[in-house]
Image: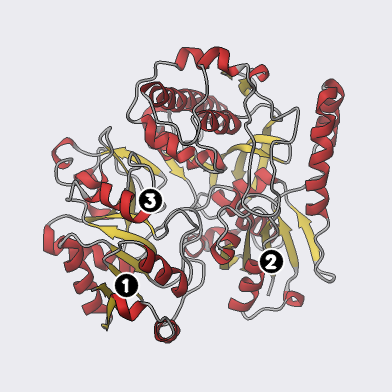
Amino acid sequence: MLKVLGLNSFHPNASSCLIEDGIIKFCIEEERINRIKNWSGFPQKSIEMCLTETNSKINDIDFIAINSNPDNFLFEKTKFLLRNSYSIKFFFDRLISRSKKKNIFYNNVNIKYIDHHISHIASSVLISGFDNATCLSLDGFGDFCSGALGKFTNGSINIEKRIFFPHSLGIFYHALTQFLGFKNYGDEYKVMGLAAYGQPKYKEILKNIIKYDENNFYFLNLKYFNFFTKNTKESYNGSPVYNDLFSTKIFDLLGESRLPNEKIEERHIDLACSIQDTYEEIFYKILNKIYKIHKNNQLSLSGGCIMNSVANGKILANTSFKKIFIPFAPGDNGGAIGAALYASSKILNKKKFIDNCLINSSPYLGKKYKNNEISFVLENNKNIKEIANIYYYNDDLLIKKTAQCIAQKKIVGWFQDRIEFGSRALGNRSVLADPRDDKIRDKINAQIKIREMFRPFAPSILEEYVDEYFEQSLDSSYMSFVFKVKNNKIKKIPAVTHVDGTGRLQTITSRGNFKFYSLISQFHKITGIPLLLNTSLNENEPIVMSPEDALNMFIRTKLDIMVMQNFFLIRK
C-alpha cells in the first residue's frame, strides 16, 4: 500500500492530508486543532491526527509531499532581483521562509517538493471526474507565480503558461481589501459581500492600478504597491499578519484608506463594488482567452482567487465553458491534498484517480466524535447543565425534533460526523436557521457570529429543487457559486437572499450527506421550503472541531440549540 502524507507548511492555512493508494483517508487544517485562525506555521498537530486516525506511524509513510518547491524558477528570481536592487531585503526575508520549507525532516522519509500551482491544479482536476480539462490556478503568490494554465489529458497535468511575480490578480484584491480597512488575512469575502450594496463608480480609476494583458493575463501598475520591495508578512508561525500591500501613491487615486474601526461610507461601498467588477472583467477575459487556446468546454479551477464565488457564478454566462469543477478547498489548505495526489499519481495507475474521484470528492475528511466521547465531555462540563436541558434521540427523532425547532425560528448548532475540510461549513459543523425569517440574519450576525451586518448567509438546498429556486442550475456541493434567486422566490427565503437578489448556494444530495439531506427534507415537509440557512459553526474563530469547541461556543453565544451527534441540547 502506498501511503503519502501531504502538507501545506509554513504558509497560511497550514494543513495535512494522508492518502492511501490514491484515496484520501484523512485531512485536517492545523487551525481546527490549535484554534488559531489561518495558522501559517508547521502543521505538527494535524500530522499527528492524520497518523492517529488512520492507524499509521511516520515510518509507514512512503513519501511526504509538500505543496511548494522553493528551488523552482531560480532564473526568474535572480533576473527580478538584478533588475530591482531595492528588493534585496525582500529576497533575504523570503530566504528565511524558504529555509523553513526545505528543512523538514521525518527520520528517513522521502520528501517530494511539488510545485505550488501544480498542487493547486491537482487538488481540483484529480478529483473532478474529468478525463480531460483546461486547468487554471490563480492566487496571490506561490513559488514565485500567481497563476498557471495547464491541460489535463490521459491522467497527466501539463503546465503551458505561468504568470510570474510581481503581477498578481490575488494581490490586487488583497491590497484593496486592506485599503477598505479589512486587515485580517482572508478578509476578501467581506469585500464580496459589501460589493452587492454599491455601484462600480471607481472602475475606470482602478484601470490605473491593474489591467488585463493579452499575453500575461494581468498587469499591475507597481507604483501603487510595495509588497515587492519589502517583506509585508510579519508572522510565519501563527495567524498570518500582512502589513499593507499598497503604497501611499494609491491615495492620489482613491483618497485616504479606511481604518478598521471607521464607519463604512458610501465611497467604501462603491469601491468594493468596483474592485469586484474589475476582478470579474479580467477573470472572464482570461477564461475566454484560454478557451480559445484549448477549445475544451471542461474547466478545472483552483487557487485562492477561486474562493470568489460571486465571480464563479457568472462563468457560464460570460464564457464558453459548459462544465466547471471547483474543489471543496481551492486555496492553500487544499494544496496538501493536491501535493499528495500528484505525488501518488506519478506512481499509481492514473486510471485509478478517475475511478476514485467519487470517493475523493467528499469534503468530510476530518475527525468524527462518537456519542460516548460526547457524553464524556457533557458529563465533565460544569456549566452546560445549568444553561441547557440535555436529551438523547435516535437519528429519526433527532432529525424531526431539529427540523421542528428550526421551523419555530430556533437557531441551531449542528455538530455531526466527520468535520468538513476547507473554509466552508457544508452541513457537519453548521449553524442552521429558517430561511423564511427576514430578521434571523441580523440576529445571527449580531448575537452569534458577532460580525458585520452586511454579511450574507448561504442557502443549503436539496439538489432536485435548484431549478425551482435559482435562475441557474449547476452542482454547487461546496458553495462555490453565487446564483440569482428567482424573483418569485425571494420573498419566500429572505434570510438567504442577498441585497442583490443572489445566494451562495450549496446543493445537497442524499449520496453526498444523507443526514443533512434528511434534515432539510424534514424541514421541507413541515414548511414547504426545501432549503435551510447555513453558516459555519464558529464565532470569530476557526470552525469548531471538537465537542469541547462546540460547547464553549454554545455557552458564550445565544444559540438556542446545539445538536451533537444524537445529543440534543436546548437552552433553558
Cα–Cα span, label 2 and label 1: 30 Å
Closest to the observer, 561 or 400: 561
Residue 369 can be seen in this image: yes
Q: Which residue is mark 2?
A: 44
Cα–Cα span, label 1 and label 3: 21 Å
Image mark for residue 563: 1
Can you say whether 394 is above or below 564 in the image? below
Q: Residue at x 23, y 74 (%)?
A: 572
Corner quadrant of residue 163: top right
Neighbours of disc 3 within 10 Å: few (<14), some (14-19), many (20+) = some
Mark 2 or mark 3, which is nearer the start of the sequence?
A: 2
Can you say whether 291 is above or below 512 in the image? above
Image mark for residue 109: none
State how the image is colored. secondary structure
| Image coords of residue 243 (percent x, y) | 64, 36
Q: Nearer the viewer, mark 1 or mark 3?
A: 3
